[in-house]
Amino acid sequence: MAVTVDIHKEKVARREIGILTTNKNTSRTHKIIAPANMERPVRYIRKPVDYNVLDDVGHGVKWLKAKQHGNNQTIRGGTLSRTNPPTQKPPSPPMSGRGTLGRNTSYKTLEPVKPPTVPNDYMTSPARLNNQQGQQSPGRTASLNQRQRTHR
């Protein structure tokens, strides 16, 4: 009977709590508002791509214009032809001050890493000399001999 009374009291308390609550006011208005004056989009006009702009870029074959017999003729020449060296120096990399290559230096070449070397006293320790002769070290022998068998 006491359990029934407790259940009834809890129901009444929950009802009173429910009366004190209110529903959340949710506005159903649109969050996105259309602009007042609609701008007309610019009509797309397809333009052909002019690849002639790229003629002097990269490592492709260069076309040199030369005057022969008073007429302009184009002569095809490879990029590996023996010509005079360039008079301008190549562009230097941007100096931002936050680089990882060092301060106020251009590109840095890394020094080669030395190959690993064996220390002079590596094979002179007594334990290593015993191992070299085919004998086991005393610590290893003792631990192997003292171990008990767990299976038969």
Image (tube, rainbow, N blue to C red):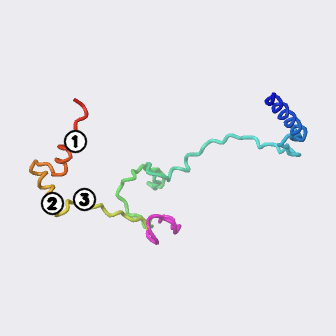
Q: Which residue is mark 3?
A: 115
- Badge 1 crowding class, 10 Å Cα cut-off, few under 14, some 14 to 19, many 20 or more, is few
Disc 2, disc 3: CB below 8 Å? no
Q: Quadrant of residue 113?
A: bottom left
- Find numbered disc 2 in the image and state the secondary structure of the residue it sits on: loop
What residue sits 9% from the left and 50% below the top? 133
* Residue that label 2 marks: 125
Q: Residues within 10 Å of mark 3 (few under 14, many from 20)?
A: few
Where does the image place residue 118, in percent across and percent down from the top left?
Answer: 20, 59
Task: Using the image, tell me which numbered label, if any, was put on residue 147.
Answer: 1
Q: Tell me how many marks there are.
A: 3
The secondary element bearing badge 1 is classed as: loop
Q: Nearer the viewer, residue 50 or 21?
A: 21
At horizontal 89% and vertical 45% (from top left) the residue drawn is 36
Of mark 2 and mark 1, the one earlier in the sequence is: 2
Q: Position of residue 46 (x, y in %)?
A: 68, 40
Which label's residue is closer to the chain start, 3 or 1? 3
Kindly identify the amino acid type of the residue bearing the numbered disc 3. Pro
Q: Nearer the viewer, residue 32 or 117?
A: 117
Q: Main secondary structure of the magenta part?
A: loop
Residue interval drawn in magenta: 92-105
Relative to residue 115, is residue 63 drawn left or right? right
Image height check: is 39 above or below 91?
above
Residue, far right: 19
Q: Quadrant of residue 32?
A: top right
